[in-house]
Image (spheres, rainbow, N blue to C red):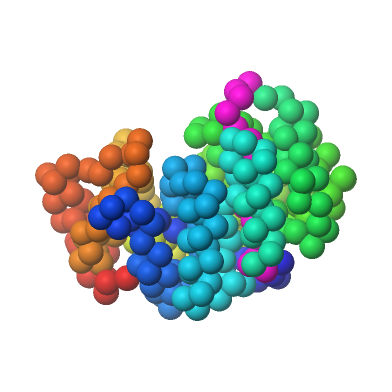
Amino acid sequence: MRSELLRGLWVASLTPLAADGSIDTGVLARHCRKLIEDGCDGVALFGTTGEGQSFSVRERIDALEAVLKAGVPRERIVVGTGCAATTDAIELTRHALGTDIAAAMLLPPFFWKGQSPDDVTASVSAVLDGVADPSLRVILYHIPQVSAVSIEIPTIAALRKRFGAVIAGIKDSSADFTHFDRAFTAFPEMLHFVGAEPQFGRVLEIGGAGTICGLGNVAPRLMAQIKEKRGGAAAAQRDIEALCRFFGDRSFLPTVKAMLAALSGDAGWRRTRAPMRPVSDSAAAEIAAFAQGLLGARKAA
């Protein structure tokens, strides 16, 4: 896999849906290309922001194939391969490996709650043993507020000891910088990403890999300014923090989809896969007004 480019600004891509509820792979490919044109280093498909757990194994495989066929560079793609069922995770991870993309982002099998570090180690090991290929590169996905499964230091240590370079990195979407810093200090040779956008600049300053984040879908150029530390980086940081405050207690996924719909002029972006529901028309109007004020018009993806 092509993990040598895995640094900087990676966007956890939203997944567009057609009117019949299927994945609109044409819009998805155009969106990915536009994000890269706007200064992003790559995209991550089918993570939390991409509603990954709401799609079947077949849908996720077919969508990745379609995006690659549409010309999105494979070295600029990470794909989420985690599933509740170990066998599904093996199938998706094996497919990701075969496409020679940058890496697989692996959420541990998550249905059973109260897992100990040894349990998490065993479940991730089962996936990696099922793929059984030393050329695999995996980014562990830590998002306990959603998955209720935590990836702690003992798990990382055990996996690194057994699988070595296969465990290439970790995405910490907990928004707990203390947790990020513990892993970063213990395993400096790994790639360490954050999901919380306001932490992006701080992570770069200390030598972390960067971010895989959802707000890059609607504010890629602001995030790129933070990465490049141009003259407007401080202003970009303030705008990103203002954007995060706007989300507040709103449901993130329907809100960011409505925001992209407003900025791109494509109302189809508002569609979600159950159990998520689109925002109301009144909420969409409020989101559009805020987005236009802070972010301005964005050419259709």
Q: Can residue 89 be seen in the rendering of this structure?
A: yes
- Where's residue 78, x and y in %? 58, 61
**Is residue 214 rendered to the left or right of residue 64?**
left
- Where's residue 282, x and y in %? 12, 44
Nearer-the-camera pick, 18 or 260: 18
**Is residue 3 rendered to the left or right of residue 283?**
right
- Where's residue 271, x and y in %? 28, 50
Residue drawn at x 71%, y 66% as measured from the top left: 1
Q: Main secondary structure of the magenta part?
A: loop
Q: Can residue 106 be seen in the rendering of this structure?
A: no
Residue drawn at x 73%, y 43% as measured from the top left: 127
Residue drawn at x 16%, y 56% as measured from the top left: 289
State the extent of the magenta-drawn residues as a range: 100-114
- Where's residue 137, x and y in %? 73, 58
**Is 103 one of the magenta-colored residues?**
yes
Question: Which image quadrant is residue 75 in?
Answer: bottom right
**Is residue 236 rendered to the left or right of residue 227?**
left
